[in-house]
Amino acid sequence: MNADVEFLNYVYQNSQMGIDTLEQLLEITEDEKLQTCLEKQIEGYRKFHNEARDILNRSGYDEKGLGTFEKIRTYLMVNLQTMADDSTSHIAKMLIQGSSMGITEAVKKLHQYENDVEKDIKKLMERLQEFEEENVEKLKEFL
């Protein structure tokens, strides 16, 4: 698999994880301000998700979504972590940790494949990284 496809699938999977997790947390939180924040983030992730899929498809590749095991694992982990504490602060902390992992992985991939990906695909990854960083900043107010 070439670096462009790997980057695009990373963006596709990362955004899918964001959408799935945030939709699950929307059902758990009762904080209207946090719900509004999560809805905006879902909208942002959907844009990345669609853009990565469209570029992959135009290039003749199928997008590789998250596996069933990964989806179930994430769903259960969110439920377990919110079962004992579903406070706004705890949910914000969970999301900050998730976005931080996304930032770290994006930076790692950008360094690893610095000269091996097309500029527009690299820019997509950089935009995803910036989006994750903005999400962290916005979520800090809920801690």
Image (cartoon, rainbow, N blue to C red):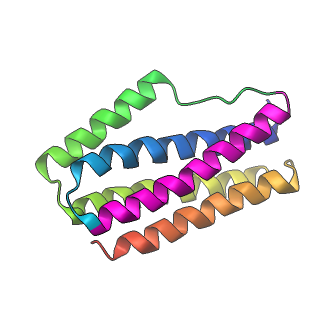
Residue 142 drawn above or below residue 108? below
Residue 41 drawn above or below residue 52? below
Q: Quadrant of residue 115?
A: bottom right
Instruction: Residue 21 in the image: state x and y as whole percent.
Output: 39, 44
Left or right: residue 64 versus residue 81 is right
Instruction: Residue 135 in the image: state x and y as whole percent.
Output: 47, 66
Q: Residue at x 48, y 42 (%)?
A: 17
Instruction: Residue 132 in the image: state x and y as whole percent.
Output: 53, 62
Q: Quadrant of the C terminus?
A: bottom left
Nearest the viewer among 108 and 32 is: 32
Residue 54 among those drawn in magenta: yes
Most distant residue in the left direction: 84
Numbered range of the magenta stretch: 33-60
Residue 53 among those drawn in magenta: yes
Does residue 108 appear in this view? Answer: yes
Q: Residue at x 86, y 56 (%)?
A: 119
Residue 92 drawn above or below residue 1? below
Left or right: residue 115 versus residue 76 is right
Q: Residue at x 47, y 59 (%)?
A: 41
